[in-house]
Amino acid sequence: AAEASTCTDCSVGYYMSRQRASACLACGAGSYASSEGSTACTDCPAGYHSSSTGASSCAACDSGYYSGSGEASCTKCSGGEYSGVNATTCQLCPVGRTSPTGASECDACDAGTYADTEGSASCTSCSAGTFLNATGQAACNECPPGRAQSSTGQSACSECEAGKYSRGGNTECSQCSAGHFQSMKGQTNCSSCAAGRIASSTGSSSCTICDTGTFAAAGSASCSKCDSGRWSNETNGAQNCSLAPKGTYTRVGASEPVPCDIGYYTDTVGASEQMPCSALDSLLTTLEKGSTTCDACLSGHFIEYDDEGLYHL
């Protein structure tokens, strides 16, 4: 048989590096030959790939993927990374932004969430006691004084109700302690009840006036009864009780002093009992109620006491 008199150029995507070859070889995956008659294949440049043999050109990597030189396929960007088309490497998402795998861009964290490091694959919810009302942030803010937040991932903090307060960064508003109150919302502290007024329970929004016959110091949780020998009739609440004046006496919880009966007296302030004149002398008495001393019976009169110690002139 006659020998061939001419040689044929290798087609694009094929090559032959030696003479007297009977056939051309296909370029391997990750390489290409763009012209006929090639003696060698060229590696796909970084950012490109060829997935099959015999390629005449390389295809650009899609966004969200990358490749080095001579790659048969592109590699997907990891979570927290992104890339555009024909990328040679993936870029880290900046703080405040995240991405899933194979992303072409990073998404801003929603309000109530944050990402504090570069290359974050997901956002983190703000913890209880903090909030974030903007997107794409790297940190959450503490709840301001007068507000609190018990849930995670929130964009705002709730205002403290009347009877409660917070100093800032709290998950719950604190109740005013007994003896204290807060009548307004969103406050940072509670006030002591004024003297003569009380708050018997926690979380009070107002104070209660003590009844007559009782008293209370400022910041008290309960009213106390006036001791015997003392009294109070302050309609707006008493800070303390007054001593019963001479000629009167009081029992526990009195709202006013009681004048001594005829035949009885008190000669000191703060008396808890009236004293009978007969204890001094059987001929002594008083001529009117509320006496501070005893007097001798008038000429021509005498005193007679009944079984209860009451006199009869």
Image (tube, rainbow, N blue to C red):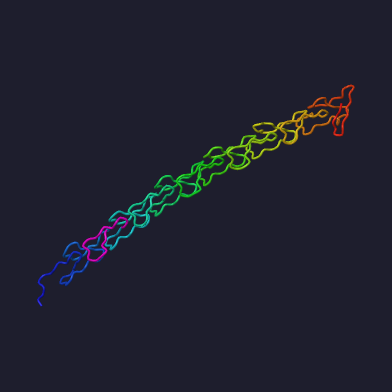
Q: Residue furthest bottom?
A: 1
**Quadrant into which the N terminus falls:** bottom left
Q: Is residue 137 left or right of residue 270?
A: left
296 over 42 or under it: above or below: above
Q: Residue furthest top?
A: 299
- Magenta region includes residue 260: no
Residue 175 figure quarter: top right
Q: Residue at x 41, y 54 (%)?
A: 122
203 over 21 or under it: above or below: above
Q: How many marks?
A: 0
| Magenta-drawn segment | 48-65
Q: In the depicted view, which residue is nearer to us: 126 or 88? A: 126
Q: In the depicted view, which residue is nearer to us: 303 or 174? A: 303
Counting from the top left corner in percent of width and height, residue 141 is at 46, 45
155 over 280 or under it: above or below: below
Counting from the top left corner in percent of width and height, residue 8 is at 13, 68
188 over 102 or under it: above or below: above
Counting from the top left corner in percent of width and height, residue 156 is at 46, 44
**Quadrant into which the C terminus falls:** top right
Question: Which secondary structure class fits the magenta region best?
Answer: loop
Q: Residue at x 70, y 34 (%)?
A: 213
Counting from the top left corner in percent of width and height, residue 306 is at 87, 32
- Magenta region includes residue 53: yes
Q: In the depicted view, which residue is nearer to us: 141 or 16? A: 141
Q: Is residue 250 left or right of residue 143?
A: right
Q: Residue at x 59, y 40 (%)?
A: 204
Residue 250 figure quarter: top right
Q: Is residue 233 left or right of residue 174?
A: right
Q: In the depicted view, which residue is nearer to us: 263 or 217? A: 263
